[in-house]
Structure formats: C-alpha cells, structure tokens
C-alpha cells in the first residue's frame, strides 16, 4: 500500500514535471515512486532521452553527474548529497595523466564509476553491462582499464585479443567477498544458480554460473526456470528479487555486501529534495561537461 509520503512525492513530481531516476540498489519505497529503475548504463541512456527539465537521481554522485553531462540544460539533483561511490574517488586525473605519459599509445577506458573530472582525460566509458562489448569494439589493441581491476580482469579474460593494463582499484564492497565465502554459499545451497557482479574478485566470479550487471542479474532470474539463486551483488537485490518472486529462493553471497553509500538515500531525502529543501544541485563547468561527454557519448555509440 502506498504511504502518505509516497503520495506527496507523486503529487510534487507531477506538479513540477520532475523525472525521478533510481538505481536498482535503492530501497523498495523509493523504487515504487521512481519513473525509471535500472543499472548504471540504463540510467545514463534514460537521462538523455527524457523531456523533463528537472531530474532527481536516487543513487550515487557519479550517476547524477552522468545525467548532468548528458543533459546540461537540465536541473539535476542528487537526492542525498553524501551518497558517493568510494571507487569513483580512488583515482584522479593527475594520476591518470601521469600514467598516460608513460603509455601514450594506450586507450584509457574508464568504468562509469569515476568522477566527471577524471572522465575528462579518458577515451571511453564502460559500465559493467557494456564493458566487454565496448573493449572488443575499441580501435586500439592497447588498453588502460580504470579504476576497477576486478571488472578489468573479467574483461581481460573475455577479450584475450586486447592487451589490457590494470591498476590497483575497485569496489571495496564487492571486492571484500572471499573465495571461501563463495565456496561455502555453494555448499550450503547446492541447487542454487550463482549469479555475480563482475566487480567481485576474479576467483569468486570464476565459481559463478553467470556474471553481469545488476540489471543482467535481475533479467537472468526473470528468464530462468530455476527456483534457487545465490546473489553476488549488493544485498538490496536479494530483497527486491525475493519481493518480486515469492515462490523462488534467494540467498546472499555474503552478509557484507552492503554499500553504505547506495543505502544513504531515504524516501524523506527524495521528498525534501522535491520540496527544494535537500539534496544537491549538480554543477559542472562547461569545459568538464564538454570533455567528459566525449567518452560517455562514445560509450553509448559503441554500446549499441
Ligand atoms: P551496475 O552497472 O550494475 O548498475 O553497477 C553499479 C554499481 O555501482 C555496482 O556496484
Ligand atoms: Fe561504488 Fe561499490 Fe557502492 Fe557500487 S557498490 S556504488 S561500486 S562502492
């Protein structure tokens, strides 16, 4: 049943013609009032194609920045201004420029989980759902893949024809899962299909039946006749899937798969942001937008 706050949110959103975007890791009450729910790739494409003048992102900062880069004419808000992505902050453009100097003939492929500032010195962005396809299609055999070395290792295995160099970065949440935890989960649930996000360590991904983005994992479940699944990504997905498919069983790969940043946004944050009393308006200078847009546009072009 819809709550009073949710009703008010729906009224305000209609009145002010606001588009509410939510990453699938958000809580159920937020997903219920969002106009669109998806993984990073789907959210970026969605943002580009909507007529609304105002957009609120319930997710993390790099996602709101991506919306602003693709639609600079829109007012874009991050519903909770503290929601960052620790991985996105791991590398800055000075560091990457210094590596580029040493390897001038490498194409720099940036996971979308990076700051707008870092994207200005990269050649193309990828998301977890598009990384393999885009790396295959890049017109350069030498690739510097940043910042996630686990997603990078996954891509490297899938695209052996490319010379892929990795740096020491990654998602602290997904990378915390150990091989032992994965083996224990498989032992405890021998009939379950194990689905994993490629931000997990390679030794964990290797034990899975399928690796993909949050949307890929959810689509896999939708199309599968299996009854039990081990979910190797943020535990919110376990809850959403269990809610959607009450006759199937979903198990956490690890109880540590909790991203505090993705969980920071509440329904009240969204309500306050709609009222103009909270959240953060994303401001990026023209040069940053122009330069960072090139690699996001390239991602959309190569990801088709
Ligand atoms: P997706 O591309 O699967 O949405 O990943 C976003 C993310 O932050 C995963 O941790
Ligand atoms: Fe960033 Fe990892 Fe959280 Fe995703 S789960 S937002 S990659 S820290």
Image (spheres, rainbow, N blue to C red):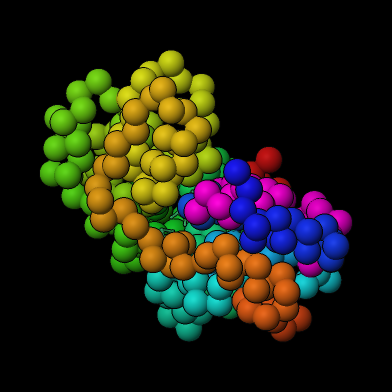
Residue at 71% from the left image edge and 50% from the top image edge: 35
**Quarter holding the N terminus?**
top right
User: Is 294 or 38 nearer to us in this picture?
Assistant: 38
State left or right for residue 178 relative to residue 296.
left
Question: From this viewpoint, is residue 94 visible?
Answer: yes
Residue extent of the magenta highlight: 27-54
Residue at 32% from the left image edge and 49% from the top image edge: 200
User: Is 202 or 56 nearer to us in this picture?
Assistant: 56
Question: From this viewpoint, is residue 37 visible?
Answer: no
Point out the quarter of the image occupied by ligand 2: bottom left
User: Is 215 or 81 nearer to us in this picture?
Assistant: 81
Q: Quadrant of residue 176?
A: bottom left
State left or right for residue 273 relative to residue 98.
right
Return the x and y of residue 159 as percentages of the image width and height.
43, 40
Residue at 16% from the left image edge and 31% from the top image edge: 188
User: Is 293 or 79 nearer to us in this picture?
Assistant: 79
Q: Quadrant of residue 66?
A: bottom right
């Amino acid at each position: 049943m819809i709550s009073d706050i949710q009703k008010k949110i729906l009224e305000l959103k209609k009145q002010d013609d606001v588009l509410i975007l939510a990453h699938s890791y958000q809580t159920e009450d937020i997903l219920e009032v969002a106009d669109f729910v998806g993984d990073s790739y789907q959210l970026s494409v969605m943002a580009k194609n909507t007529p609304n003048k105002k957009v609120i992102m319930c997710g993390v900062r790099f996602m709101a920045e991506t919306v602003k880069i693709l639609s600079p004419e829109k007012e874009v808000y991050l519903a909770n201004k503290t929601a960052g992505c620790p991985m996105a902050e791991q590398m800055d453009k000075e560091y990457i420029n210094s590596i580029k100097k040493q390897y001038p003939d490498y194409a720099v492929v940036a996971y979308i989980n990076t700051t707008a500032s870092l994207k200005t010195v990269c050649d193309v962005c990828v998301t977890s759902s598009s990384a393999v396809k885009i790396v295959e299609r890049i017109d350069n055999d030498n690739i510097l893949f940043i910042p996630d070395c686990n997603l990078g290792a996954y891509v490297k295995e899938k695209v052996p024809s490319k010379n892929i160099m990795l740096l020491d970065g990654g998602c602290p949440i997904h990378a915390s899962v150990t091989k032992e935890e994965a083996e224990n989960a498989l032992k405890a649930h021998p009939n379950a299909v194990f689905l994993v996000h490629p931000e997990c360590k390679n030794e964990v991904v290797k034990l899975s039946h399928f690796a993909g983005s949050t949307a890929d994992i959810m689509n896999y479940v939708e199309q599968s006749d299996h009854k039990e699944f081990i979910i190797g990504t943020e535990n919110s997905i376990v809850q959403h899937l269990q809610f959607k498919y009450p006759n199937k069983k979903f198990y956490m790969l690890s109880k540590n798969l909790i991203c505090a940043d993705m969980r920071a946004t509440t329904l009240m944050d969204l309500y306050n942001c709609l009222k103009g009393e909270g959240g953060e308006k994303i401001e990026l200078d023209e040069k940053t937008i122009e330069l960072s847009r090139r690699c996001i546009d390239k991602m959309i072009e190569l990801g088709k």
